[in-house]
Amino acid sequence: GTVGIGGVFVQKFTGAGSLVWSNSVAFRNASNQLQNPYPAKVLVRDLGGGGHEIFVTGYRDRGDHPGGTWGGGTMDTDPFLLKFNSDGALQWSKSLDSVDHEVVTDAIVRRDGGLLLCGHHKLSPDGTNVPGPGTLSSGWLLWTDAEGSFENARRDVSALGMTWSGVTE
C-alpha cells in the first residue's frame, strides 16, 4: 500500500500471519518534493530453493511540472518498478519519465525475468497534457529486462479511446 504522501509500504507475512519483514520506499522529484505513488500490482517470482523476488509496479505523480500536480495543471504520472529480495531489501527502483499521464493497470514477470506492463495514457483532444472535456486514453505496453531497464519505450498499441486492463505472456 501507500504511506501517506510520497511512499510505498511493503510487508511480508508468514502463512500464520506473523510479520517477516517490512520496508518502505519514498518517491521524490528533482526538487526533492515527495511524489504520490499509486501501486497497481505486486508480483512474486520463485527462484527455487526457497528464494524469491518481489516486484511492485504502479505509477507516481511527478509533481515537478508547471501548474502543480494532476489536479492543478498538467496530467503527468509515470510508471514505476520496485524490486525486493527475499529478505525485503530493495534491489532497485526504476521509473520511465515521460510527458504523458501514464497509468499502469497490470503486469507480469516474463519467463526471462523481465517484466511486461500494460496500461493507458491520457491526452486531451488537442494532443496536449492538459485535462479537460474530451480527454481520451490510448493503451500501451512496456517491456523491461531482468534488471528493470526498459527495453522498449512506451508504444501506443490500441486506438485512441481504448485502454488495456490485463496482459499475459
Image: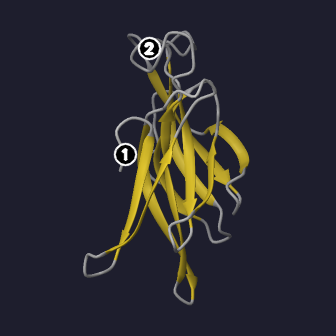
Q: Give whichever of discs 1 and 2 has the lower sequence position.
A: 1
As helix, strand or loop, the secondary structure at mark 1 comes to: loop
Asked whether, in this view, residue 2 is left or right of residue 151, the answer is left
**Residue situated in front as seen by the camera: 158 or 77:** 77
Q: Is residue 78 above or below residue 19?
A: above
Q: Looking at the picture, tell me which residue is in the foreground, 5 or 54.
A: 5
> Observer-nearest residue: 11 or 129?
11
Q: Position of residue 95 (x, y in %)?
A: 62, 42
Q: Amino acid at mark 2?
A: Pro
Tell me the crowding category of disc 1: few under 14, some 14 to 19, or many 20 or more residues within 10 angstroms, Cα based. some
Viewer-closest of 134 and 154: 154
- Where in the figure is residue 75, as x and y percent of width and height? 49, 21
Residue at the extreme left: 16
Q: Residue furthest bottom?
A: 49
Q: Residue at coordinates 33% horizontally, 79% vertically from top-left? A: 14
Alpha carbon separation for disc pair 1 and 2: 25 Å
Query: Up-down: is 158 above or below 16?
Result: above
| Quarter of the rendering occupied by the C terminus | bottom right
The residue that disc 1 covers is 2
What residue appears at the point 45 percent right and 22 percent down from the top-left corner?
136
Query: What is the number of the mark on residue 131?
Result: 2
Q: Position of residue 141 (x, y in %)?
A: 59, 45
Q: Is residue 160 left or right of residue 153?
A: left
How packed mark 2 is, by other alpha carbons closer than 10 Å (few <14, some 14-19, many 20 or more), is: some
| Residue 167 visible in the shown view | no
**Relative to 1, 91 lies left or right:** right
Scheme of image coloration:
secondary structure
| 12 up-or-down from 35: above or below | below
Q: Quick check: can you spot residue 128?
A: yes
Residue 20, percent from left and from top: 38, 74
In the image, what residue type sits under mark 1?
A: Thr
